[in-house]
Image: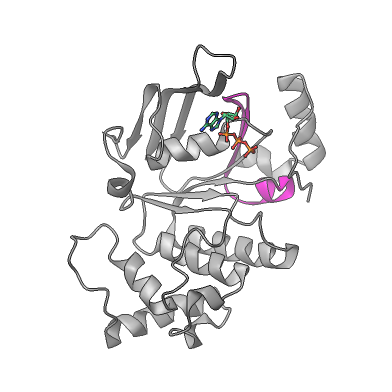
């Protein structure tokens, strides 16, 4: 499904500010894989997401989706295949538009330009059904401006918008990190349901170790631009946060330094 082969990215090469963001990263995801990604600050997690989504070009290596190299495709062309939810609840939605207008916009993503984002009765009924699945009452607020929603509600809507068109890859970039614990848990539950129901191939960056172990069928750990540990579903079932942190220390030679670390 997703293949990254020998992907490297260096910032400010040849200067005192040189930073290795990714170093010869190889990552192959099977359809339906739900992979959690953890790592220290500056490990390269966001760069990984940015390269898959086309925000950044790698210096070396290639990214393939379903066997097709997508290296030449700009970000907007990849949006049909890739859904992404960011940490910032403001990033995924348009605040001055209503819930149904936002959904209409997401719905036509990847289709030819010029189509109206007008909301027909049948579209509205379908939006309502999708919103009902979130279980937070947004189906009764279709004409509310998105700017009026709470951070958690906006993240739930962003998640729905990112997955509307059944993307081949879903990228979740610390998408619960800016929320309070109760809302973060709600979004985590909704994420798990959507990813499982739609069998979406998903990469989720998180700073919550317990969540990284509990969710998905695979866990990868990054440090200094490399994937240093890849844990499969079987191992993950019996893994504890202490063991995970211990393994990190053992392999990397230093403690996991993550200023947003949540143990569980
Ligand atoms: N635009 C940029 N210019 C220069 N250096 C950059 C840039 N973006 C990232 N880096 C550097 O590349 C490395 C990887 O950064 P990246 O943001 O991918 O890490 P991260 O794992 O997402 O970190 P964090 O958990 O702190 O958000 C870091 O050393 C970072 O300082």
Q: Is residue 255 left or right of residue 126?
A: right
Return the x and y of residue 238 as percentages of the image width and height.
Answer: 73, 42
Return the x and y of residue 35 as percentages of the image width and height.
Answer: 55, 43
What are the residue bounds of the magenta stretch?
208-231
Can residue 216 be found in the magenta stretch?
yes
Return the x and y of residue 4 as percentages of the image width and height.
Answer: 41, 30
For the point 47% across and 79% down, which residue is it? Answer: 145
The type of colouring in the image is one colour
Question: Which image quarter is the N terminus in?
Answer: top left
Q: Quadrant of ligand 1?
A: top right
Tell me: residue 146, above or below residue 256: below
Relative depth, front residue between 128 and 215: 128
Tell me: residue 108, above or below residue 262: below
User: Looking at the image, how many numbered discs can be counted on the residues?
Assistant: 0
Q: Is residue 79 left or right of residue 246?
A: left
Can residue 195 be found in the magenta stretch?
no
For the point 49% across and 80% down, which residue is it? Answer: 132
């Amino acid at each position: 499904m997703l293949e990254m082969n020998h992907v490297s990215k260096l910032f400010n090469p040849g200067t005192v500010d040189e930073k290795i963001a990714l170093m010869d990263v190889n990552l192959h995801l099977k359809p339906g894989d739900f992979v959690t990604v953890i790592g220290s600050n500056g490990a390269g997690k966001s760069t990984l997401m940015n390269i898959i989504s086309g925000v950044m070009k790698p210096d070396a290596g290639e990214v393939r989706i379903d066997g097709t190299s997508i290296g030449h495709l700009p970000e907007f062309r990849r949006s049909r295949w890739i859904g992404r939810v960011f940490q910032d609840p403001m990033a995924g939605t348009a605040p001055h538009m209503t819930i149904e207008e936002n959904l209409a916009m997401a719905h036509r993503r990847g289709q030819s330009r010029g189509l109206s984002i007008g909301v027909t009765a049948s579209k509205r009924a379908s939006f309502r059904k999708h919103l009902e699945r979130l279980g937070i009452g947004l189906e009764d607020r279709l004409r509310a401006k998105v700017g009026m929603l709470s951070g958690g509600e906006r993240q739930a809507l962003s998640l729905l918008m990112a997955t509307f068109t059944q993307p081949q890859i879903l990228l979740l970039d610390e998408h619960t990190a800016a929320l309070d614990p109760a809302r973060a848990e709600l979004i985590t539950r909704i994420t798990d349901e959507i990813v499982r129901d739609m069998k979406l191939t998903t990469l989720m960056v998180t700073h919550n170790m317990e969540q990284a172990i509990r969710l998905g069928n695979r866990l990868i750990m990054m440090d200094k631009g490399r994937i240093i540990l890849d844990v499969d579903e079987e191992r993950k079932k019996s893994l504890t946060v202490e063991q995970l942190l211990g393994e990190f220390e053992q392999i990397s030679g230093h403690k996991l330094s993550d200023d947003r670390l949540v143990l569980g």
